[in-house]
Amino acid sequence: MNQVRIPNQRAIIDRRAIGAAIAELVARDGAGARPEIVALLRGALDDGRAEVARRLEEKPSAGHECCAGQAFLVDQLVRLIHDHVVRDVYPSGNRSTGERLSIMAVGGYGRAEMAPHSDVDIAFFTPTRRAPWCEQVIEAILYFLWDLGLKVGHSSRTPDDMVRMAKEDLSIRTSLLEGRFLWGDNDLYDESRKRFFAEVVAGTERKFLSEKLEERNARHKRMGDSRYVVEPNVKDGKGGLRDLQTLYWIGKYIHKVRSGADLVEAGLLTRLEYRSFRRAETFMLAVRCHLHMITGRAEDRLTFDLQRQVAQRMNFADRPGKSAVERFMQLYFLQAKRVGSLTGVFLDHIDQQFAQRRSRRGLLAGFTTRPRWVKGYRVNGGKIEAPTDDWFAKDPARLIEVFQIAEAEGLEVHPATMRQADRDSGLITSAVRKDPRANALFLDLLTGRNDPEKVLRWFNETGVFGKFVPDFGRVNAQMQFDMYHHYTVDEHTIRAIGLLSRIERGELVEDHPRASRLIHQVASRRAAYVAVLLHDIAKGRGGDHSVLGAEVAEELCPRFGLDQGETDLVAWLVRYHLLMSATAFKRDLTDPQTIENFVAEVQSVERLRHLMMLTAVDIRAVGPGVWNSWKRQLLGELSDAAQERLRLGHMPHRRKERVAYKKETVAGLMGENSHMIDDFGKLFGDAYWIAEPEEIIARNLVQFSVARSREEELSIHCEYDEGRGATLVTIIASDHPGLFYRIAGGIHLAGANIIDARIHTTRSGWAVDNFLIQDPLGKPFREPGQIDRIKRSISDALANRIELVPRLAKRPLPHSRARTFDVRPRVLFDNEASNRFTVIEVNARDRPALLNRLARSLFEFQLVVYSAHITSYGERAADNFYVTDLLGNKITSAERLRSIEGALLDAASDERQAELEEA
């Protein structure tokens, strides 16, 4: 885009020396010299790449220099090959006017921006079609390039072909736009360029702009439509290199700029903005070069496994509370954010220029719409703008006010005002942060009733958000290095605020029916929005972000204008924002002690309502597919049980009454089959009747009746449960030691994940085990082929027809890049979480064999598993078991607990997994 000076070019490749060596080989061996020439050129390519790599290692952020060096290397090779072919392979002493050839570098190569393994995109121009000498030379050049192992994108056209095809195809037009003379006939190149701009470009500027923006939007949608996805594509992702290149293409097409610096002369960027443009481009190019060098191929995806390596190559180091890779990715996202800001400013200037052109001609010449004024701001075409250049300097609180008015009035903030706010964001001082009016405006913006998410994102883009709330500025562009969170902390927070707003507007009733009711029942909606804003505010500080965040909330809430009651509520919500999900997903909700412990922390219905809403939007804002009906059901069950406990002031422990009520309800569901309750009900203990939902009990009784009438030794029933978003698998079999771990192994071998399990034994010695399962993408099994595979796999596992351990060990990880993350296994014991059971929680790297191995370890220690609750967080699994010893007692011996812990840690370790895979 700009000419980059390449120091000591001959250290990369010495064209004169290689040219002389080729001449010597030809003189000695004639046509037989080709293999040696290819070997000579391949050596030059390898040596040149090594030198470019060495320079990048020496200056890890020198993206432009690396790309320019690579382009220079390829330039010289193409020129050497061309000269050899036309001089030695197909010499023509007296060429006609039709026997001319020009070679043009196009695309990224045309910009002289080549990452180490980028394609070599070249266009051959000839005066006429079917010129035999030209065709022979082109073919010979291509074969040399292919023999060097280069991936070549090429075309061969006449100037007439070029004009016709460029008019028809946007990608060809864009590629030629960046054309650069490489070698051959310079006059033919000049003729082609003149015709391109005169016959293709002229008069089509507006169309080109709209087509490029449409192409850009489609590309963003393919890549996740956010510049904050945690595995970005450096080239094609939102805020990546392609976005910067699009600005250059538009500038070149409309203003004929010859370099990125010319965008300043064209009035499209200020000098300061261009420096930002150049910094972002340099950084992105360096990252892309490192990716190519690490992988040895044209790799543009900054995946988790590569992020750590690129951070190391670019000399990022760990800091307290933030790892090297998180610091590297934070800088990446800040650059991507800057690209977005520059894009808005750039396109606004283009729009203004087109508008001025239209106003100077045509029927509407001289006609302009009259702006209206809102609180001193000019509003025109649905965009609000500051009336003067010193508007914010006169009153810095206006930096918040302009966004608050935009949200309240449903307006866009004019790009020029966005640029002005960005420039003046430094005016936000401590005095402004303490200003009651500024804080009132901010709170109105945060709790706006139109679209606070969209406007807060603009607010963040300008940097004003981070200046006004410095704690938020600290998490700006901060990623969390795991496979669970899909977005940076600031983007996750803004999305969560947007979700709460949509829930309040009634747009998400189907997905969030409970939260849609609760938002209109809480005493303070302001507290709800502030809690969402602050729930992750202390991430990356090197401690428990919930505890640290509560301290931040106690400082910020009074500043924002919340009263003491609201402040206490927000601080509590931030402190305990993970409590509800941890309880719902990791604990047995039918155990009265679970509800007692939860309510002891919550203490009020108002807190419960707020916590339910915060939990829902927090989970959903993590990323696509994380929120599902199973999680909604569990949170709803916990909320209902806690609300009943809070309403009554005690847990309804009336065991006999609860069992009787459950049987009565089940009888109503079963209709004419209700006699089964009398036939088999006494075989099931009270614990079964209390633990299982009514509709599952009804299914179990029918299956049990059929199995006993047929005298089946094994009965497996699978049924899609729409309400839970999972498949219910019920196994009825003669109870025997190790049944649970074998069933778990069979289910995993069939490709399913267990998310919940309840294990029961009837008084007649039959096991009735209920499992809820999903596929690795969190979807239920419902196709006949899937159901048959589940049944067959469980049957084979229980009959010992397959070797579970080695086959499970060889199954791939649920996430292909999970090994990138350091997940150290951890075992926790809790004898307070339940009156009857010891609760064991195992955190470890998620893998198909994990549950089977953990369950086997529990079996080997003669522990009885009554229920299991399985949760995954990307690469990490949290498996929770409610257990007793063989006599039905809790495990309290410190020595025995240490032994169990050691066995579980061994079962969950990566070393053990590696041993099993080798076996």
Image (cartoon, rainbow, N blue to C red):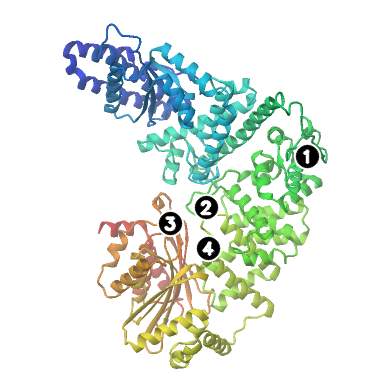
Give the labeled residue for mark 4: 628
Q: Residue at x 28, y 27 (%)?
A: 148
* Residue at disc 2, secondary structure: loop
Above or below residue 73? Residue 187 is above
Label 2 and label 3: CA atoms lie apart by 19 Å
Could you say whether the residue bearing mark 1 is in a helix, strand or loop?
helix
Mark 2–mark 3 CB contact (< 8 Å): no
Give x and y (percent) for residue 197.
52, 20
Tag 3: amino acid: Arg
Nearest to N terminus: mark 4 or mark 1: 1
Camera-near label (4 vs 1) is 4
Q: Nearer the viewer, residue 291 or 632?
A: 632
Label 2 to label 4: alpha-carbon separation: 16 Å
Quarter of the view holding residue 907: bottom left
Q: Are marks 2 and 4 in contact (CB under 8 Å)?
A: no
Residue 68 located left or right of residue 226: left
Q: To which residue does mark 3 refer?
A: 824
Q: Residues within 10 Å of mark 2 (few under 14, many from 20)?
A: many
**Residue 398: mark:** 1
Distance of mark 4 from mark 1, alpha carbons?
41 Å
In the picture, measured across the screen, residue 2 lies left or right of residue 42, that is right
Dot 2 or dot 4: first in sequence order is 2
Q: Position of residue 799 (x, y in %)?
A: 27, 75
Q: Label 2 belongs to which residue?
A: 485
Instruction: Give the mark nearer the N terminus: 2 vs 3.
Output: 2
Pick whichever of labels 3 and 1 is earlier in the sequence.
Answer: 1
Q: CA distance from mark 3 to mark 1?
A: 49 Å
Marks 4 & 3, CB-CB < 8 Å contact: no
Would residue 741 be visible to someone looking at this image? yes
